[in-house]
Amino acid sequence: MEVYMSSTSPGSYSCRRFLLFLLILLLFMITNSHISLASAATTSSNQTYKTYIKTTCNSTLYPKVCYNSLSSYASEIKTDPLKLCNTALEVALEAAQNTSSTLSKISEQTGLLSTEAAVIEDCIDNVKDSIYELQDSQNAMGQLGGSNVEFQIDSVKTWVSAAITDENTCLDGLDETKVNTTVKKKISESILNLSMMTSNALALINTLKF
């Protein structure tokens, strides 16, 4: 009876296993290196975009508020002035909608004096007008083009300016009417935040060049 022995010795088998291990390790290191480089590139790009937003926000009256409200959208805005302005309008519109909701809840409180209820109702109307004007400005920004771009931009500025006027009208009404301190504080804080967002949007639009 003949017995056939494998031509592969234990030593060569161990060598192959070691080489396979080295190959797997090398592939892992290459893959990990690519991931690290991609991550570093993304981080670098995001930092560039945030720097752009911060620099442009310096042209506004409230640069810190501007940067804090827009920096989270850096990867979408990149260094595109139009996207920056559209995002600023979107943030202002969201603030207006939140303010409208806050005012509606305050108006439903019991125990309000008739003068307080009246000034709050006026504020609600003013903020609703602000919402419409910000929406009009957004729509116009989305349709920019042709030979009359400057006229279109002027129209956008007019609507945003009108929104600011409406917001300030609400604040003027609060100052001219005796309102419960707590109620007045809630309304004033909400309107002031909205006013800063809208002001910043207008300032950024003013930086556009065509």
Image (cartoon, rainbow, N blue to C red):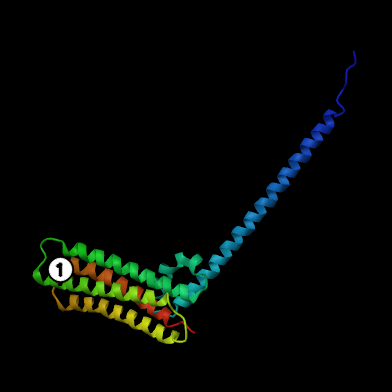
Does residue 200 appear anywhere in the picture?
A: no
Residue extending farthest to the right is: 2
Quarter of the picture containing the N terminus is top right
Q: Residues within 10 Å of mark 1 (few under 14, many from 20)?
A: few
Tell which of 129 and 174 is nearer to you: 129
Q: Residue at x 18, y 66 (%)?
A: 183
Residue extending farthest to the front is: 146
Q: Position of residue 197 (x, y in %)?
A: 35, 73
Q: Position of residue 115 (x, y in %)?
A: 10, 72
Task: Tell me the amino acid under the disc marked 1.
Answer: Asn
Is 43 left or right of 191, judged from the image as shown?
right
Q: Residue at x 34, y 76 (%)?
A: 136
Is 73 left or right of 42, judged from the image as shown?
left
Say which residue label 1 marks: 180
In the structure shown, which secondary structural element does the residue marked by tag 1 occupy?
A: loop
Tell which of 60 and 99 is nearer to you: 99
Tell which of 85 and 145 is nearer to you: 145
Q: Position of residue 29 (x, y in %)?
A: 69, 49
Q: Position of residue 121 (x, y in %)?
A: 17, 71
Q: Quadrant of residue 59?
A: bottom left
Does residue 56 appear anywhere in the picture?
A: yes
Q: Quadrant of residue 164?
A: bottom left
Q: Residue at x 30, y 78 (%)?
A: 163
Image height of 34 relative to 144, above or below: above
